Image (cartoon, rainbow, N blue to C red):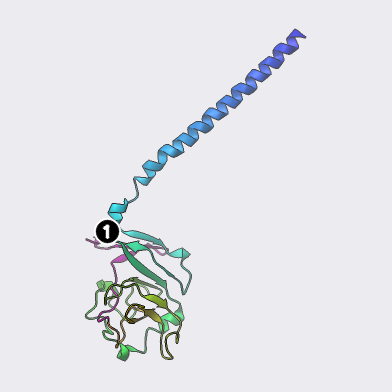
Amino acid sequence: MADHAVVAEEDVDLSRRKFLTRATIATGAVGAVFAAVPFIESWMPSERARAQGAPTTVDLSKVEPGQMVTPVWRKQPIFVVRRTPDMISRVAGHDGELKDPKSDSSEQPKYCENPLRSRTPEFLVLIGICTHLGCIPKQRFSAGELYASWPGGFFCPCHGSRFDLAGRVFDGSPASLNLRIPPYSYPNPSTLIVGEDEKGAAT
């Protein structure tokens, strides 16, 4: 009987020891995670660095055709539009209605000096600030949405400036320049970096 009690006590002690060991390991693992968070965060740009111009990364795989996402770079909204083939086709055919159809007087990197004002036909990248008085234009991508011949694009609700699906400004708009394009690059097909291209980060 005494032997049986000793065995039972040993079983209890062994169970306690296993429990305490597991609890200690779990606590240590949780502590390691919390200790790692500040270390991992130190790899990422601070708010101040982002405000001063640190590049912004966008996951393009999450942008559906016909959709626009609006990340922020240097405290400015950036319009990233995944144009459908139909949207791309609607960029042409109205040059005579535009103030600066070839973007000769507007601001964009050399690699965007083309009719679509982009590095690839599919993705349009613009600084989402009206070149009139700094309001944020609204997307009006559907053809005919504003008026019968409207090809789709952007409409500024403040003073009525209109821009096409390449960010080019229409005649009759208070804005005189096309929407600006920031420097940007694609390190891989599903990633966009705004504020950095082959020349490095924007200064």
Secondary structure of the residue carrying numbered label 1: loop
Residue 63 at x, y = what percent?
46, 67
Name, please, the residue furthest toward the front: 158
Residue named by callout 1: 53
**Viewed as shown, does residue 108 lie left or right of 151?**
left
Residue nearer the viewer, 147 or 5: 147
**Viewed as shown, does residue 14 lie left or right of 154?**
right
In percent of the image, x 35 and y 67: which residue is there?
78
Residue 65 at x, y = what percent?
47, 73
In percent of the image, x 45 and y 39: which residue is there?
33
Residue 34 at x, y = what percent?
44, 38
Q: Label 1 crowding class (10 Å Cα cut-off): few <14, some 14-19, many 20+?
A: some
**Viewed as shown, does residue 109 lie left or right of 33?**
left
Splitting the image into 4 quarters, where does residue 163 fall? bottom left
Splitting the image into 4 quarters, where does residue 179 fall? bottom left
Chain part drawn in magenta: 175-203
- Quadrant that contains the C terminus: bottom left
In percent of the image, x 59 and y 22: which residue is there?
17
Residue 188 on the magenta segment: yes
- Quadrant that contains the N terminus: top right
Name, please, the residue furthest toward the right: 1
Residue nearer the viewer, 108 or 140: 140
Mark 1 is on which residue type?
Gly
Please say if 72 is above or below 153. above
